[in-house]
Image (cartoon, rainbow, N blue to C red):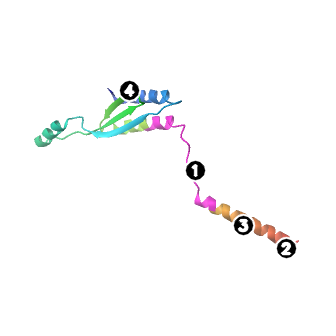
Amino acid sequence: MVRLQPDPFLNELTNMFERTTEKGSVWVTLKHSSDKSKVQRNKMKTAGEKIEYRCLIRATDGKKTISTMVGAKDHQRFQSSYATILKARMTALKKRERKDKRKTADSDKKPDSKKRSSAAKKTSN
C-alpha cells in the first residue's frame, strides 16, 4: 500500500477512476485513526497528552491500493475536492425515478375533468 499526501492521492484516485471507466470498480474506505499503536496511545493517555485523530482514506481498484491521512485542518478542503471527483466520475449511475405526489394527483384529476366535459357536450347536443 502506498501512503500519499492528500493532493497526490486525489490525482491518483482520478487516474483509478479513468482506468476503470469501461470495466471495473474502485473501492474507497474512510477510517478514524490516530496512526499510533495501541501501546503508544495508552502511554499518551496516562501522560495526559492529547491524541490527534485523523482520517485514514484508502482506495483500491483490486490491483493497486493507495492511502492518505487527512487531519482536521485539511478536512474541509480535501472533502470538497473528493466530492468534485466523485460527482465527475459517477456518470454511469442512473437517476432514480421519483413520483411526485402532486403530479400523480393532477394526472388523476385531469382525465375525470375531460370525461365530464365530453359528457356535458353530448347532453347539450
Task: Kindly check if marks 3 and 4 are in contact, taking CB atoms under 8 A apart as contact.
Answer: no
Q: Nearer the viewer, residue 2 or 72?
A: 2
For the N terminus, which image quadrant?
top left
**Residue bounds of the magenta highlight:** 83-104
Relative to 95, residue 18 above or below: above
**Image disc number at residue 123:** 2
Tag 3 near tag 1, CB within 8 Å: no
Q: Estimate how packed mark 1 is, as few (under 14), some (14 to 19) or many (20 or more) residues with alpha carbons within 10 Å.
A: few
Residue that numbered label 1 is attached to: 97
Q: Is residue 114 above or below residue 15?
A: below
Q: Label 4 belongs to which residue? A: 8
Q: CA distance from mark 4 to mark 2?
A: 77 Å
Along the viewing direction, whichever of 92 and 51 lies nearer the viewer: 92
Res 121 label:
none
The x, y position of residue 16, in whole percent, is 45, 28
Q: Which secondary structure lies at badge 4? A: helix
Where does residue 19 sit, x and y in percent of width and height? 48, 27
How far apart marks 2 and 1 lie (CA) works out to 42 Å
Query: For numbered disc 2, what is the local secondary structure?
Result: helix
Labels 2 & 3 near each other (Cβ < 8 A): no
Q: CA distance from mark 2 to mark 3?
A: 17 Å
Q: Quadrant of residue 106?
A: bottom right
| Residue reaching furthest to the bottom | 123
**Horizontal arrangement in the rendering, residue 121 relative to residue 104 (left or right):** right
Q: CA distance from mark 3 to mark 4?
A: 62 Å
